[in-house]
Image: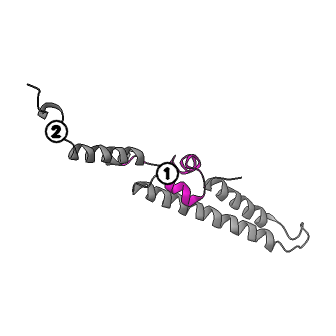
Amino acid sequence: MPRTRKQLEQAAADAEAWLDSLDPEVTPAEDISDLAAIGAALAKVAAAEGEIEVAVAAARANGRSWPRIALVLGISKQAAQQRYGAAEVAPADPRQQLSAFGRDRAATRRASTASSPARGRNRARPS
């Protein structure tokens, strides 16, 4: 039953408003501290979810891949992207737009090109 941070915040606000609306003149006196504790815990969950969103955005800005982030979150890569990727902003540096796989492939190509004989127009022509 995962809910978004906005849904959690709304549920906490609704619970608090309901608890505040209870009129002791109409409602029999009853200890509602257990219900208040649930509302307080829900507000903490919403705040923690906000911290996670900020941390995931920072990890992505630092070039962390979705599989690594998902591993830390304990969810699948697809679930992590669906839940936290919507707010992702495209990086200013076009090199960061490559996926981790793309960066690895590009680095491998550069390394193999640097270590291999000259290609293209610098290649020795048969006589």
The image quarter containing residue 23 is bottom right
* Residue 99 appears in view: no
The magenta span reads: 66-91
The residue that label 1 is drawn on is 66
Residue at point 11%, 26% (across, down): 126
Main SS of residues in magenta: helix
Quick one: 32 or 38, which is closer to the camera? 38
Quick one: 55 or 114, which is closer to the camera? 114
**Between tags 2 and 1, which lies in front?**
2
Q: Is residue 71 magenta?
A: yes
The C terminus sits in image quarter: top left
Task: Report the side of 122 relative to 53 (left or right).
Answer: left
- State which tag comes first along the sequence, 2 or 1: 1
Kind of residue at badge 1: Trp
The residue that label 2 is drawn on is 118
Q: Secondary structure at mark 2?
A: loop
